[in-house]
Amino acid sequence: MTTNKQKLITGAPGRSLFLFALPMILGNLFQQFYNMADSIIVGQYVGENALAAVGASYSFTNVFIMIAIGGGIGASVLTSQYLGAGKYQEMKTSVYTFLITFAVLSSLLALFGFFSNPHVMAALNTPQNIYEDAVLYLQLYFLGLPFMFMYNVLAADFNAMGKSGIPLCLLIFSSLLNIFLDLLMVVRFHMGVAGVAVATVIAQGVSAVISFSILMLLLRTYPVKERPRLFQTSMLIHGTKIAVPSIIQQSIVSIGMLLTQSSVNQFGSSALAGYSAGMRLESIAIVPMIGTGNAMSTFTAQNLGAGQPERVKQGYRISYGIIAGFAVFLFLICEFFYGTILSVFLDAGSSSVAYETGTSYLRFIGCFFCLIGFKATTDGVLRGSGDVNIYMIANLINLGIRVFVARFFSPLYGIQFIWYAVPLGWAVNFLISYSWYRTGHWQKKSLIQKA
């Protein structure tokens, strides 16, 4: 049962990091396909306005998705460090504490999202011809928010225990289920935007229940001397210190999308449809970068828990090669296959404005994916060590750059300035985090007492 743990703290750093990251990357890709199925199916079977409505909703829902992912990853740092130190009883208490915490938090956020989304969509200047569909999609989506939260927290626990293959298998299953239900609701029952929302809620619910059952069985394989506590306030406090900056880091892209949504909306529903398609493709493209950064976080936490900071440095250096390889591949895809990719989202009747907007966005952003990769792995080291203050500031500056340029320059110089700011924000974020990494302060941090 300790094989995966031993690989992370004793195996060759580069190979261990890559093999651990790969299922996480594939799992995150399926998570994006899971979320993206709604856009593809309504775009192809309902039309451009339906795609724009789901796209307008996506920026808001993605904030909550990133809160769930960021919270789970941040909280699981504590779990990883206890596992690395061989403290299984404390590890179990950490898992139980944050499952309870996020069950309560997600229920409160679901209520907030359900009742606030009409006002948010109005504040974002959502075009009138898609407003009602966007609000309907969101209201149905938020009914399933607790399931989505719990699945992502459970997936983070699996990854923290070195079992990154389990979330991958679960995501493959839930993605296929979601696509089947999307087609059933839209093509067979003609439910339109409401149909894809209902399908997503059902698929998320099934995934959460299965994930919880598997985790409970897995925890039984870790021997303990006495029954672990179900909730411990001190662990909640320690984990929250990591979870909050992690939520901010994971949410930067989606919050930036949300805050710049009104800037896109002013260019009309056709431009929004093209931007939505490009934005979804960007979300897929950055998955290997974010996945490698998340793997670096667990790798760092387990090795620091085992008292091996030099292995963290080795893994971090090797991560640059992994990121560079992904970046070159993604650049070639965006540069030469953008038309084929966009046609998956936009049907033959979509306007030239939609195609031009999506093409411009995708071909430009494809040149800079390495920047978010370098930022993600550097942030991963800082997050995994518990040294989170500087990287949180760096991510907030990243967000500020995106919003400022979009709000003040796009009305004057065109919609392109909404995505011109993205690589600038990534670069500044990386430089700040890397400068702090170089100080070595992260090596002195520890969230647990060594045995």
Image (cartoon, grey):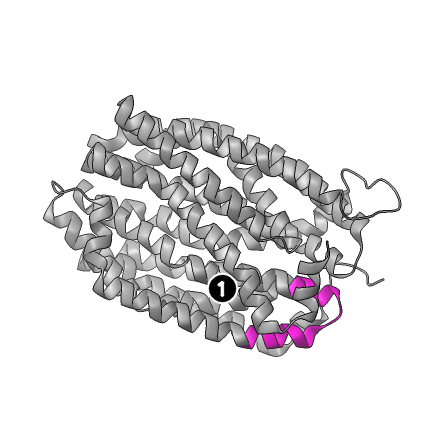
- Does residue 286 appear anywhere in the picture? yes
Q: Can residue 109 be seen in this snapshot?
A: no
- Tell me if 251 is positioned left or right of 383 in this view: left
Can you tell which quarter of the image residue 296 is in? bottom right
Q: What stretch is highlighted in magenta?
A: 300-317
Mark 1 = which residue?
376
Q: Which of 51 and 246 is in front in this view?
A: 51
Q: Quadrant of the C terminus?
A: bottom right
- Image x and y of residue 247, in percent: 54, 50
Asked if residue 315 is among those painted magenta in the image, a careful observer would answer yes
Dominant secondary structure, magenta: helix
Q: Which residue is drawn at 66% across and 41% down?
A: 215
- Answer whether residue 187 is magenta in the image: no
Residue 143, above or below 86: above
Residue 288 appears left or right of 121: right
Q: What residue occupies the far right of the structure in this picture?
A: 225
Taking the view exactly as shown, the residue that stands out farthest to the top is: 189
In x, y percent, where is residue 269?
19, 40
Count of numbered circles on the image: 1
**Residue displayed at 74% across by 64% down:** 305
The residue under the point 29% across, 56% down is 406
SS state under label 1 = helix
**Percent coordinates x, y for residue 371 in the rendering:** 40, 69
Rendering coords of residue 6 (x, y %): 71, 64
Mark 1 is surrounded, within 10 Å at the Cα level, by few (under 14), some (14 to 19) or many (20 or more) other residues, namely many
Q: Which amino acid does label 1 sit on?
A: Ala
